[in-house]
Amino acid sequence: MFQNLSEKLESAFKNLKGEARINELNIANTVKDIRRALLDADVNFKIAKEFTDKVKEKAVGSKVLNAISPGQLMVKIVQDELTELMGGQEAAFEVEGRPAVILIAGLQGSGKTTFTGKLANYLKTKKGKSPLVVAADIYRPAAIDQLTVLAEQIGVSIYSERENKDAVAIALNAIKEAKATNKNVVIIDTAGRLAIDELMMNEVANIKAAVNPSEILFVVDSMTGQDAVNTAKAFNDRLDFTGVVLTKLDGDTRGGAALSIKYTVDKPIKFVSSGEKMETLDVFYPERMAQRILGMGDITTLVEKAQAQFDEAEAKKLEKKIRKNQFDFQDFLDQLQQIKKMGNLKDLMGMIPGVGKAVKDIDIKDDAFKGIEAMISSMTPYERANPDSLTPSRRARIAKGAGKDLQEVNAFMKQFEQMKQMMKMMNNMPMGGRFPGMRR
């Protein structure tokens, strides 16, 4: 995420490395490089200039404390300004009403339908809501099929009328259905086009007028940079939407959309999304995003993701098993499943300070655990619960069942045993081990 921008900003701060104090000359060089980094990230020139002017103004008047270096001070100033540029603080998300109506808009290919599913899943699992998703794209049959599959996957209801070509009527009928079936949130997935046209704009504006939504979310592909910002302005002029959703943050994101959109349309970014998994939707926090852009990681979000997936009571049971050296393959498999639910592995590692840069050139696939899962799945329940029972003949059978070489199985067994010993040592330390989601 924002890899090129992060690297160029880091390079800009090197102008101050080894400097004893900040002066106008080294500030000028640093600010020039920061502006160039923003322009390369497809940030509008006016925005980049105004941003760097503010950074320069704050830096010139700053006194460097003995405890920090000029470089550290500049990073702090840039972090504060990036945070402010992206909105300053978390934006409220309104889901009030009986039912609350949320209208989803954007161009075709921006990820609207996938986001509709993710938002329904978020409201169901995180907010305790009972959502109804509505297929109001009357032009693309595949959109109805896609939303149907997503709704089944996350266990929410869907409303569609395949033969009806009146999107406004579909939306109104869906609200009636929601009231009749006690659904408290209606999420309407509207049609998009490859480019802005009058027909699309009129249709989504008519839906808005008919259903009076509490939230209108504009979904934008974050990989499109300044084009996304221009599209957002055109939509906002017609719809006056309430917030922005940035999708595809796991792709080759330059950063222009995230940094420019709030400034341009004066509407907050409310959610960010990456990947296809329904769990990969996050509330947007400007400060945390600024930290990630500057290579500081995002431990707060990482911990929140862990707490959302790990049950405290289960964690305590697991801790007891580890203390007694009873951690088994089933426990290990369960933990892998929880980690996978947290999102893209490389993205998760990027939230750890200093790790993002280390893994930037490493291809970490989401199926990295596939081989391990196959080996554990090839074990009997008895073997999973009793790691010491795996004789050479059992290991040979497991290798065959998992489609692996015997050497791979043996290597995994050795790693598993080493991990057990390390976990036991950590839990025997005076402070004790701590599992995600546990409080001490």
Image (cartoon, helix red, strand yellow):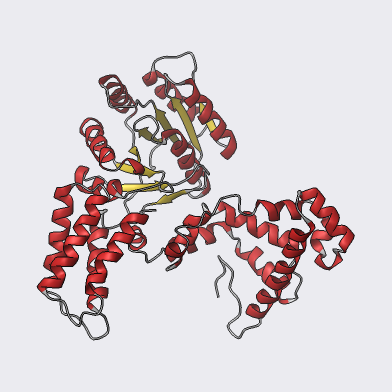
Location of residue 324 in the rendering, given as x and y in whole percent from the top left corner:
75, 76
Q: Position of residue 342 (x, y in %)?
A: 54, 54
Quadrant the C terminus occupies: bottom right
Q: Nearer the viewer, residue 412 or 436?
A: 412
> Which residue sits at x=49%, y=37%?
117
Say which quarter of the image contains residue 79: bottom left
Q: Residue at x 46, y 26 (%)?
A: 135
Horizontal relation, residue 173 to residue 312: left or right: left
- Residue drawn 28% across and 65% down? 11
User: In the displayed structure, would residue 304 be above or below residue 75?
Assistant: above
Task: Specify whether 20 is left or right of 163.
Answer: left
Q: Position of residue 268 (x, y in %)?
A: 28, 48
The answer to whether any part of residue 237 appears in the image is yes
Q: Is residue 174 left or right of residue 103?
A: right
Residue 104 occupies quadrant: top left
Front-most of 206 and 403? 403
